[in-house]
Image (spheres, helix red, strand yellow):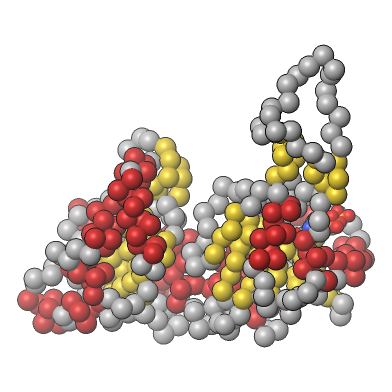
Amino acid sequence: MDKRILLIVGGGVAAYKALELTRLLRKAGVAVRPILTAAGAQFVTPLSLSALAEDKVYQDLFSLTDEAEMGHIELSRSADLVVVAPATADLMAKAAGGLAGDLASTTLLATDKPVLMAPAMNVRMWDHPATQRNLATLKADGVTFVGPDEGAMACGEYGPGRLAEPPAIFEAIMGLLATGGPLAGRRALVTAGPTAEPIDPVRMITNRSSGKQGYAIAAALAQLGAEVTLVSGPTALPAPAGVNRVGVETAREMLAASQAALPADIAVCVAAVADWRPETSAAGKVKKGEAGPPVIQLVENPDILATLSNGAGRPKLVVGFAAETDRLEDHAKAKLARKGCDWIVANDVSVNGTMGGDDNAVAIVTAGGIERWERMPKGEVARRLAARIAQEF
Ligand code: CTP
């Protein structure tokens, strides 16, 4: 890959992850030109960054050697993409305010290239209205974000603010670099996660689904250049970078959001939609009473895959998923006919042993036959499926 990124490394405990990110990028053949802020240099050394990037590290706006070698304006245009990882509250504030007092902020102000930020900071700093304002401003300016993740922090607190993991930042970078990939100009719709069907304001019927496979497919399609809408039920996952996520709760909302995402060239229905919903949902919490447990009357939910497959404005390629335990090919073929889609990605649950893990063993069932793939990580299934989809266009 003949691509180059400018990597701005801000100050923070998570700065060490920028080294791993640099390694992943170099391994994929992406050239990395690092800019290290003064605060960043308190956490990683210029030498380790330079060694992994195999390039000079730029640190100072007023360094004669740096400027003679490459002026800051030229530097800001020397890459296909500018990445800020970790993006501190300070860097975000500077970029949102258009400040240009040091090399990193000047570069961000001077660049005409897309910018990706991976924020990392203390949860209270992240939640502060000032940071949230800056985030909204930067998003409106066209900056793409990956993370932050939620979890335990180095400062002992818990919440959103952790730097996204290097593989996630790497994938976001590859996605942005690939605009112009084989699916450029194509629109894709992906449904993912479970749906939640309310019984009353505090209770619901739902399906077990992490959303991992659907999110990975949305990310992989975006990496190949597709414009992706991800219609997602409730999950704990961050939206993949470069993907337009529409959050929904119920199957009916998922159907409406999916239809609103049309026209699309590709639809991949990965969501574990609840087959039924309570006929009525109580406005207030149902109390335990003398009448004993309530009887809940269920009604069938719309089938999103079948509706998309048979409706007006049908995407050219419609792909469904199915978890099967036995007679995989027979069941998948019957489902293909019943739903009217083009492919069923059959998840061989008997081979998987357990569901919900990070690996998946799937088979692609089409009217023409079956293609069995060996067991592999869900991210790999997603990449191969996206590549297979791209062959159809
Ligand atoms: N699906 C959907 N809307 C529904 C139910 C399922 O879009 N209301 C989609 C899923 O996203 C997935 C495929 O249909 O792509 C899975 O179908 P599955 O649940 O296996 O099929 P069912 O019709 O429920 O068949 P089964 O009798 O095997 O449960």
Residue in the image at 33% along x and 71% along y: 82
Ligand 1 is located in which of the four quadrants?
A: bottom right
Q: x and y percent of residue 81 in the render? A: 36, 75
Left or right of 56? Residue 274 is right
Instruction: Name above or below for residue 27 compared with residue 297.
Output: below
Quadrant of residue 123 within the rendered picture: top left
Residue in the image at 19% along x and 69% along y: 106
For this rendering, which residue is in front, 202 or 393?
202
Left or right of 90? Residue 339 is right
State the quadrant of the N terminus.
bottom left
Quadrant of residue 190 within the rendered picture: bottom right
Q: x and y percent of residue 245 in the render? A: 56, 60
Residue in the image at 56% along x and 47% along y: 236
Instruction: Name above or below for residue 259 compared with residue 358.
Output: below
Considering every residue shown, the one lying at the far top of the view is 290
Residue in the image at 49% along x and 78% along y: 178
Left or right of 2? Residue 333 is right
Considering every residue shown, the one lying at the far front of the view is 283
Q: x and y percent of residue 393 in the render? A: 67, 85
Give the number of marks.
0
Q: x and y percent of residue 344 in the render? A: 80, 68
Instruction: Name above or below for residue 392 compared with residue 53.
Output: below
- Can see residue 121? no
- Can see residue 315? yes
